[in-house]
Amino acid sequence: MQLSWPKRSPVIQWSGALAAILMVAFPLVPLAYQSFLDRPIYESGSLLTLNNYLNLFTNPLFHQTVVNSFLFALMASSASVFLGAVAAIFVNRTDLPFDRLWRNIFLWPFFVSTIIMVFGYILMYGPKGMISNYMMQFFGFIPWNLYSIPGMAMVSAIHGAPVAFIFCSSSVVLADSSLEDAARAAGAGPYRAIGSVTLPLLRPSLLFAAVLSFTGALEAFSTPVLLGKPVGILMFTSFLYEQGIQAVRPDYGLVASGAMVVVALVTGMIVVQERLLTNVRRFVTIRGKATAPRKIRLGVMKPMVVGLVFLWLMLTIILPLGAVVLRSFVAVLSPYIPFWEMLTLDNYENIITNSTNYISIWNALYIAVIGGALSTTFLILIALIGRRSKFPGKTILNFVAFFPRAVPSIIIGFGFFMGFIMFPFLGSIRSTIWGLILVYTVRHMPGGFGNISAPILRISEEMDNAVRVSGGDWWTAVRLAVIPLLKPAIMSTFLLLLVIFTKEYSAALFIMAPGSEVAGVVMLNHWFQGEAGTATAMSVVQLVLTALIVVFASRVLRVKIYG
Amino acid sequence: MSQQKKASKLIFVLLVVAFLWTPALAVAVPNYYPKDYDKIIDASRAEKGLYIYSNVSTDNWKPLLAVFNKLYPWINVKLLDLGGSEVLPRYIAESQTGTPTADFLVTQSAPGWARLLGENRLLRYPSPEIPHLPVWASRQETVYSFSADPAIMAWNTKIFPADMVPKGMADFAEKVQKKPDFFRGRLTSYNEGAFGGYSAFGFYKHHGEKFWNWLDIIGPMTRPGSSGGDQLEKMLSGEYMMSWNFSAINLASSTAKRAGNLIGWKYTEDGNPVLVRGMGITIKAANPNSAKLLLDLLLSQEGQVALSKGNMTVYRPDAADKIPEPTLHLAGLIKAIGEKNMIVVGWDPEYGDEAKFKALQARWRQAVFGKK
């Protein structure tokens, strides 16, 4: 007998799967380990202990943190699902004029980093924001308080609504309009039909979107840090940031145990959601019979609905972003000095003269484009292994690839920080943007993996079987038969990751080093240091770059990022 | 052939000589510097710039860095402006993981400096400027001070009436107690992290328990800010009327300058904290020679004058009469505030006591947020 080289396909499958597993374990294992150590992981002579957890649970700050975070996430997720569902119904199921325009504006926040939205909200709705000042002038009081849990939840909801909208839209579009017709035939008005038929049919999507935005709210960083901290409202992420980055002697044991608790809670939520969604058969509405979806007529209410939609988008999206642009062009924004006397380009000059500023914008862009491409390539490979092979460890791989959605960005970052400390020879990766690309890839593995999985499952196996019958191995089959058919899905995954990577920065908080700063962190620092002009100027540059990329991708490359 | 060779050799030698001479000609350092100071300058040419973590904003650095760039144009300075309590832990964490980190650190964090000294995390560098400075300017020739900046009271002159401007903390507490609704949520100060924490420490050492009684009245009306710039921005927008703990260096920011007399300010008459700002070269510095050059410049007469242009209050004795604004020199500041009302925060070892500082921060939070 002759020894043969190992076959090509198993080698690819094993190395892809192992790489994915190692990448996910790299931050999480050291994190878990640190949570049971009595001193920082880099100090010698440490002992195993449960004290971190004891300290955590007896820490009154942490108790408030838990209560605040859950209250906030509950409000934010219900509001964002409500907004998303209402918008999805009006845009897709009614004869609302200019629906595409409204939809596009409604989706803007998806492409914009939360930190930029929060800047805009402070400038407009803060205690001395421009709109708040008008309220004060005309009515003598301001009916809202941005620096409160409901205030933060509202900002978070508007930022999260596009995702809920996308989920609800796909079910709304697919829903059988004959069911609505039945309601109308039985005498129901258009709004009654929406309330009794369309909405209930959305239940699975609503639930899914709710859990998604709930976990999204739990990991929100800029909202709690910019709006909660000044009034002493701490949440998970700001608690971890304060204890882990801002303390004179950061207590890594406490941070790690806090992080573990958050991961456990989010995992629990995901399990509950999956249980709830097992029996969704009864919501099946796509049947053999084809129907042309008919739109509900708004009737006499039409002008009023249009006015309300316009007002809402103006107040929640256009004006706050406009305020960011305005702030970037003035030295001082004060109701006591007319802004046109304060016009300046200094803020933009600051970007050019301080290399940290423009390097951070460049880095964010580089990570988004190059990192997004690398990450997409890797995720296609593991999705093919997990969804389209006879690889024995498939179940584990699929589980691992989805696991990071239970781990908020700042925690993934902290975990990598611990990992790099445990394996100092990797420290040289950490200090570069390749380290950040690695962290971002792991954090957003579930999103990318999920986005590419569904189309893979839709491609019939007959395709690759044909190749296999002709003697090709697994790799040849997926390469020749599956990947070419996946092209649109690959492009949309790439664009999705590109946008997410541009916005992401809380995963970088712990691991960013001199030279690898990303725009979000630098903007946050400027804002904290009161350099709102520089922070907003950088925001505007980032907004313009993102807009160019998205427009290029959707108009020129014809990539569909959602739906 | 050989003549040509000789000529080219000669040119080469001349070039080498010219190259070796240039640095000594270009950089004019004070004449009392050691003869081999050129070695540091030459070594800095081979380095890759200078990375600074500080709690001083770019606007305040500008005049000094202009001098530094003129002297050493080949050193590319990169600034990261951080919260005062964030500077040192960030360096410690980074140096543990073997990643590149800052060469030069600047902050007031007294317990932080004490820790770094104790754990040997800083480079000992005996500056040639030591003989020209007071004894307290350096600790173990490792941590140096370059300024002593006063905490001041500042307000928006359009919304904060002149007759409400407090004289000192005692008067302030009285005014707040009389009209709590007028002040509620419209006062600001630094948070307890660094500058705010140390000035509170100073107030407490100066006034004793009385300070906590006052803070229990003033604190609940206050929304602390993470930085001076943040306080300034919100005072200008009218969100806050007044800050009772504001670093004077913020008055030099381009925002404050553009705002003109929209911002008023004064010292706290019954005891005004003055915070010593420390600096040090990291032991992991990738560019130690560039860092040494900056450290010496910051302590030199020329450097101290430049710092004062960035609104930092300097202390080098022989710089006093070169500074147009007398209160930007410690001697002038003492005259303005009065010796007995000057609370110097920094040199007393008590300020380096981490446990005491933590307890103080907890008490501060209790007063301001009503919880520890």
Image (tube, coloured by chain):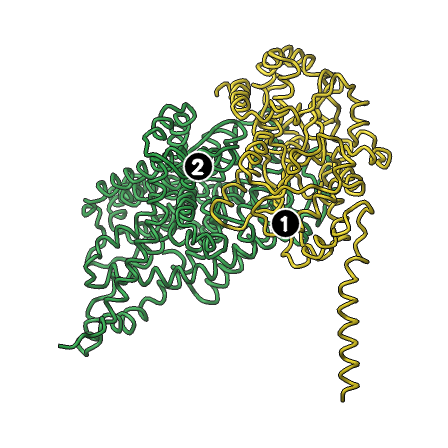
In the rendered structure, which amino acid carries the disc numbered 1? Pro
Q: Which chain is yellow?
A: B
Q: Work out whether B104 lies above or below B11.
A: above
Pinpoint residue A228: horizontal percent, then vertical percent. 50, 31
Q: Kindly give the residue lying farthest to the left in the view shown.
A: A1
Chain at tag 2: A
Q: Is residue A408 left or right of residue B46?
A: left
Pinpoint residue A342: horizontal percent, then vertical percent. 73, 42
Residue that appears at 73% across and 44% down: B296
The front one of B43 and B3 is B3
Q: Secondary structure at mark 2?
A: helix
Chain at tag 1: B
Residue A237: assigned label: 2
User: What is the quadrant of the N terminus of chain A in the image?
Assistant: bottom left
Number of other residues with Cα within 10 Å of mark 2, as a class: few under 14, some 14 to 19, many 20 or more: many
- The answer as to whether the residues below labels 2 and 1 share one chain is no
Q: Kindly give the residue lying farthest to the bottom in the view shown.
A: B1
Residue A69: assigned label: none
